[in-house]
Image: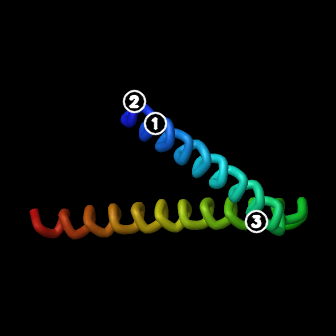
């Protein structure tokens, strides 16, 4: 009987803690300053531009070093 009461109390505390957590999450989400559509678009364009730029730079460096090592390999034969 005592064990059942302890288990029931533990479950009740867990449910209360879970409910407090969810309420806290919603409270914090209401405080967030969400970006405007223009800010979203600007950030997306910037991100895509940077990804494409870094990809191109990586491709160029890969081709350059591939060519360079191929030239060095020719001289070592």
Among numbered discs 2 and 3, the one appearing first in the sequence? 2
Alpha carbon distance from label 1 to label 3: 54 Å
Dot in front, 2 or 3: 2
Q: Residue at x 52, y 67 (%)?
A: 57
* Crowd rating for badge 3 (residues with CA inside 10 Å; few <14, some 14–19, many 20+): few
Left or right: 22 as drawn, with respect to 39: left
Dot in front, 1 or 3: 1
Q: Is mark 1 on a helix, strand or loop?
A: helix
Quadrant in the picture for residue 50: bottom right
Residue position for label 2: 1
User: In x, y percent, where is residue 27?
Assistant: 77, 60
Circles 2 and 3, Cβ within 8 Å, touching? The answer is no
Left or right: 12 as drawn, with respect to 19: left
User: In x, y percent, where is residue 38?
Assistant: 89, 64
Circles 2 and 1, Cβ within 8 Å, touching? The answer is yes
Residue position for label 3: 43
The numbered disc on residue 5 is 1
Q: Which residue is drawn at 21% across and 69% down?
A: 72
6 vs 46, nearest the viewer: 6
Among numbered discs 1 and 3, the one appearing first in the sequence? 1
User: In x, y percent, where is residue 32?
Assistant: 79, 66
Decide: is 26 above or below 75.
above
Q: Residue at x 10, y 62 (%)?
A: 77
């Amino acid at each position: 009987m005592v064990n059942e009461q302890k288990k029931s109390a533990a479950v009740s505390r867990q449910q209360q803690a879970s409910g407090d957590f969810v309420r806290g999450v919603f409270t914090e989400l209401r405080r967030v300053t969400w970006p405007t559509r223009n800010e979203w678009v600007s950030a997306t364009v910037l991100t895509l531009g940077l990804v494409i730029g870094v990809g191109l730079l990586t491709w160029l460096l890969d081709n350059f070093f591939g060519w360079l090592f191929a030239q060095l390999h020719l001289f070592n034969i």
